[in-house]
Image: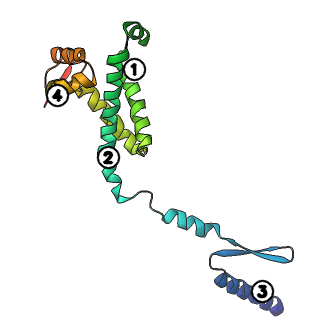
Amino acid sequence: MTVSSASFNDRLARIEKTRKSAKGRIQLHIGDQEAWVANDSAMLRQVIAKPRHSRLAVFKVLPALMVGAIGMMVVTALKMRFLTPELAEKVGSNPDLVLVVAAVLTAFGLGMMLRLASVKLMAVQLLGVALAFVGLHNIAFWQPDMAALAFTPDWVEQQTAQFEPRTLRYAETTIRF
């Protein structure tokens, strides 16, 4: 009994000695050769320890909001310049939905090009599209010349006749600010 326990304790001591000198590596015995490989748990700890994002990620929120609004402006400008009555009939009964979906896709595309592609920043881009959708008509009141260049003079006339300045409007709901 003592011989086997002594040899077992000696073996444990040898294992502990090699573990200390291994420094996070594992010694594999392949036939009569030895190979040292990295321990997965050590690599996993290194990966987990890395920060997922920097503290400067907060500064990406405003550009993401602007990218969403720009997506809506681009799609609206393209709609006013290139949408013919024949194409408008093919769009269907809800052109606003098509406009918003196209604006969201445009904003996401711009966001990916500008490296604003995280889930949170995409949600902010969605918010930018929504705010531009309900408030884009205010540009026709605040900067009519620039709005006529970006969209069309007909769009400016339509917006000034249909909406009031300093409002957010969707369907029949109007919020004044």
> In which quadrant of the rendered view does residue 42 lie?
bottom right
| Residue receiving disc 4 | 143
Tell me the crowding category of disc 2: few under 14, some 14 to 19, or many 20 or more residues within 10 angstroms, Cα based. Answer: some
Residue plotted at (20% across, 19% down): 156
Sequence-first disc among 2 and 3: 3
Disc 1 on helix, strand or loop? helix
Tell me the crowding category of disc 4: few under 14, some 14 to 19, or many 20 or more residues within 10 angstroms, Cα based. Answer: few
Tell me the crowding category of disc 3: few under 14, some 14 to 19, or many 20 or more residues within 10 angstroms, Cα based. Answer: few
Sequence-first disc among 1 and 4: 1
* Front position in the image: 142 or 102: 142
> In which quadrant of the rendered view does residue 27 lie?
bottom right
What's the residue type where badge 2 is placed? Val
Q: Nearer the viewer, mark 2 or mark 3?
A: 2
C-alpha gap between disc 3 and disc 1 = 75 Å
Disc 4 on helix, strand or loop? loop
Residue plotted at (48% across, 63% down): 50
What's the residue type where badge 3 is placed? Phe
How many marks the image carries: the answer is: 4
C-alpha gap between disc 2 and disc 3 = 62 Å
| Residue receiving disc 1 | 98
Q: Against 21, is 168 above or below?
A: above
C-alpha gap between disc 1 and disc 4 = 26 Å
Q: Nearer the viewer, mark 3 or mark 1?
A: 1
C-alpha gap between disc 1 and disc 2 = 26 Å
Q: Nearer the viewer, mark 3 or mark 4?
A: 4
The answer to the question of whether label 1 and label 2 lie on touching residues, with beta carbons closer than 8 A, is: no
Sequence-first disc among 3 and 4: 3
Disc 3 on helix, strand or loop? helix
| Residue receiving disc 3 | 8
Sequence-first disc among 3 and 1: 3
